[in-house]
Image (spheres, helix red, strand yellow):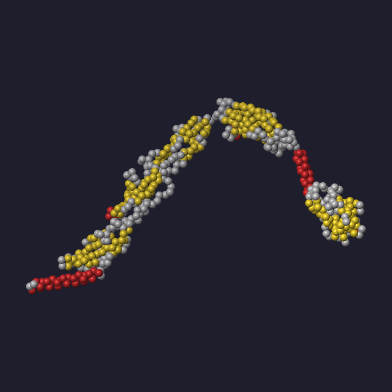
Amino acid sequence: MNPSQAAMREKAARLLRVTALVALCLCSELSQGAVGKVDKEVFIGETLQFLNETGVPLGQDWKWRWTFGDGTTKPEGNATKYYEKSGTYDVMLTVLIPVGDGHLEVNATSPIRVLVKPIIPKIAPLPPEPFYPGQKIEFKNLTNGPQGMEYQWDFGNNEVKTGENVTHFFTAHGDKTVTLRITAPNDVKVNPVTLKALISEPSLQITADPTELKAGGKVTFATDYPGPPNVKWHWELGDGTISEQQTPQPHKYENDGNYEVQATCTLTDANGTPLPGIQPIKSNRLAITVKPKFEQPEILAIRIEEEEEGKGVNAEGNYTIHVVVETNGTIDELKIDIAGLDSRSMNGTQAQDGIFRHDFQLTEPTPSISQAAVIQTLNITVTATPANEPEHQSRTLEKTIDISVTPQRPAWFLYAIIAVCAVLVGIVAWLIKLAMRPVVPGKITINNEDHWLTSSPLGPKKGSVIIKLSNYDIDYSPIVMTVTATGNRSRPEITLLLEGGEGEISANGLYYQYGRPFSAKEEMNLDLGGGKYLTFDPETGGEYTSWDTDDF
């Protein structure tokens, strides 16, 4: 290597070291700078502007480069950017410094983080009430997004509208699908959203009251139409009358005949112009029957409402009879004559659905204990006078009706029943009293006088009788004798108990103590001591003796 080449190489190396030192100084200066920062979140399609605010003077050959984190870059000092996909992105600003044959890349700042939010289309739900063809429906957009979005509403059948919120009506019923398509700024497409709309089939039902009437009468019409409010009405009432009201005024039919009524409604806009593509809605057909104002009266039947009238007795003792006359036609007066009993004339307006009713009193038959039914014959004549004489003629109908009437019982019969009941009550009370006293068989003989305990041979022998012997002989005081019966009627068991005496008691050769009971199965001859004797016989049959004791 000659001296000149060595000197040139040394010069180039010195230049390279100076350039590197300047680059290092620049990097130090850049690291102290700041890039304009985006402080808000953005949506897809929304434009962001990045500004280079480092304030570092640049050489002629130095360059800048923005890296946006989505694989795209821009070689500019200041740059704009929009994102087509949501997510989080780091943005960097890099400076390229020429060094020798290449460049030295230096990050001018730390990464800038950008949050890109998605645009989620949303349509407001429809109200729950039904919708019908021709009814305007408001579709509201609830999508949250940036300014400048474009909206396209697709209703099918090539019907498309634009705008953030729109109104639309369908021309046919059924399930409809509404699609909202949104385009974000910078022509960024957003996934569409759909909404189902149920369009109900319209129906029109009309009613009339009445549907059968006489000439000159009026009919009231009504409808249950539930559809849109903007409707043009057309009623044909069958006799040439036309009504343009939703509910016609009550209509009078002057002449008799059969008429057919139908209503038609046509959906219109707010100005009354029929909506295109929507067929008018026709109602059901109503048949109206108008009869002549006057009809020949006829008597169809005469009857008694209840043929057996034994229950309807009034305070005077008479029976109420219900006469029913069935008629048709136009009647001015109806006369009911019951031979020998009653007669009445009634105005034709007193009939209900052609039925006249007349109540009269029938004298009560002679009272009878057996209450055997009495047959009475009614001869009834009914005459109907027409309302438009002399065009129509009167009608007369006669009928004989046998009715069965039950007489009342005589008044004394009731008193007799009361008396018999009173006697029966007395007998029952006496039997109850007898049943409550003791039934003890036997006979006691003192001083040759017999005293029977009971005279009843019936029923079980039970209970006790306490006898104060002093009631029959004062010398027997204070001896008390108790006779007790147990068992049944055929074989009673009798026991005797004597109290109040002293010593022993001798009975048929046997001895017993006072205060201790002993059996008496046969006639007992008792020696009570002290010259006191009595005989007890357990037989039954004598006249009952009152022993005058508290216990008996």
**Residue 408 falls left or right of residue 25:** right
Look at the picture and state if 222 lies above or below 182.
Answer: above
Is 356 or 335 nearer to us in this picture? Answer: 356
- Compared with residue 483, is residue 199 higher up or lower down, i.e. above or below? above
Left or right placement of residue 406 versus residue 147 in this view: right
Residue 295 is situated, as x and y percent measured from the top left of the image, at 55, 29
Seen at 62% across and 33% down, the residue is 324
Position of the C terminus by quadrant? bottom right
340 vs 210, left or right, is right
Camera-nearest residue between 56 and 83: 83
Residue 446 position by quadrant: bottom right
- Which image quarter: residue 395? top right
Of residues 495 and 237, the one nearer the viewer is: 495
> Residue 529 placed where, x, y %?
90, 59
| Count of numbered badges drawn on the protein | 0
Q: Is residue 436 visible?
A: no
Residue that appears at 20% across and 68% down: 57
Residue 266 seen anywhere in this rendered image of the structure: yes
Residue at image location 88% in from the left, 61% down from the top: 503
Residues 324 and 524: in front is 524
Q: Residue 110 in the image: state x and y as whole percent.
A: 27, 67
The quarter of the picture where residue 87 lies is bottom left
Q: Quadrant of the N terminus?
A: bottom left
x then y, percent, for residue 298: 58, 28
